[in-house]
């Protein structure tokens, strides 16, 4: 069986193209996040897996749970997903849509983990360096991770820059053991 991300990709691309053509990337982004959150709820998930509900009933239930926040085209997407038994792919569809949106807008979400709190000046320097290196606007989220001992770990999509003391000690141990 194909992986869920593979099955979700065509739906995410189609949703992105519709949103881009209508100039509604942000609206679609919010709608897909809402749908993904609702579909990821364990009670909703069990209900969606129930063979007692038809595809139309599943779609109606999901649309009803989301309320008036969905565009008519997003409701159509829900119906299509229900007909194809793909409603549980909504979290992956939302994730892929966000990646396409970020690529279109030339932005990237970056997580900066440090052993201690950084001052604004250092955070700004890191942000500027990352913007230069990645050639994109940066949405930086910082967090303190005392497990690191010292240094920092930067995650930007698939790119990981580990300059933490723990990471360097791990590399040193691996080098000594090989």
Image (cartoon, helix red, strand yellow):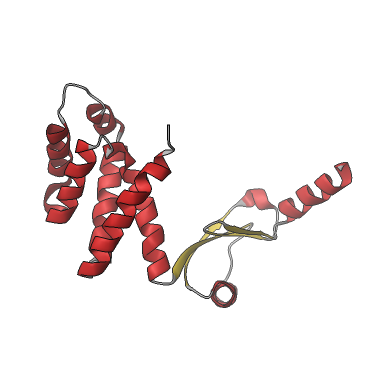
Left or right: where does residue 59 sit relative to residue 136? left
Query: Which of the pair 129/55 is nearer the observer?
Result: 55
Instruction: Compare residues 145 and 55 and report the one nearer the observer.
Output: 55
Q: Position of residue 128 (x, y in %)?
A: 55, 78
The reply to whether residue 5 is in sight is yes
Residue displayed at 30% across by 37% down: 88
163 relative position to 42: left or right: right
Coordinates of residue 20 in the picture (x, y in percent): 27, 67
The image position of residue 22, as x and y in percent, is 20, 68
Q: Is residue 56 left or right of residue 140?
A: left
- The answer to which of 166 and 173 lies nearer the viewer is 173
- Say whether residue 26 is visible: no
Residue 120: x percent and y percent? 54, 74
Q: Quadrant for residue 48, please give it.
A: top left
| 63 vs 5, nearest the viewer | 5
The residue lying at 32 percent from left, 53 percent from top is: 12
Image side of residue 10 versus residue 51, left or right: right
């Amino acid at each position: 069986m194909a992986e869920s991300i593979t099955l979700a990709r065509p739906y995410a691309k189609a949703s992105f193209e519709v949103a881009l053509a209508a100039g509604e990337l942000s609206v679609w982004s919010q709608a897909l996040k809402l749908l993904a959150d609702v579909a990821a709820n364990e009670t909703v998930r069990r209900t969606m897996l129930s063979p007692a509900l038809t595809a139309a009933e599943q779609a109606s239930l999901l649309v009803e749970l989301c309320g008036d926040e969905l565009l008519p085209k997003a409701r159509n997407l829900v119906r299509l997903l229900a007909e194809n038994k793909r409603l549980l792919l909504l979290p992956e569809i939302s994730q892929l849509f966000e990646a396409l949106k970020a690529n279109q807008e030339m932005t990237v979400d970056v997580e900066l983990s440090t052993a201690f709190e950084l001052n604004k000046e250092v955070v700004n320097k890191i942000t500027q360096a990352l913007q230069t290196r990645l050639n994109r606007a940066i949405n930086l989220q910082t967090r303190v991770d005392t497990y690191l001992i010292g240094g920092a770990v930067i995650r930007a999509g698939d790119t990981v820059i580990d300059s933490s003391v723990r990471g360097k000690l791990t590399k040193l141990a691996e080098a000594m053991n090989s």
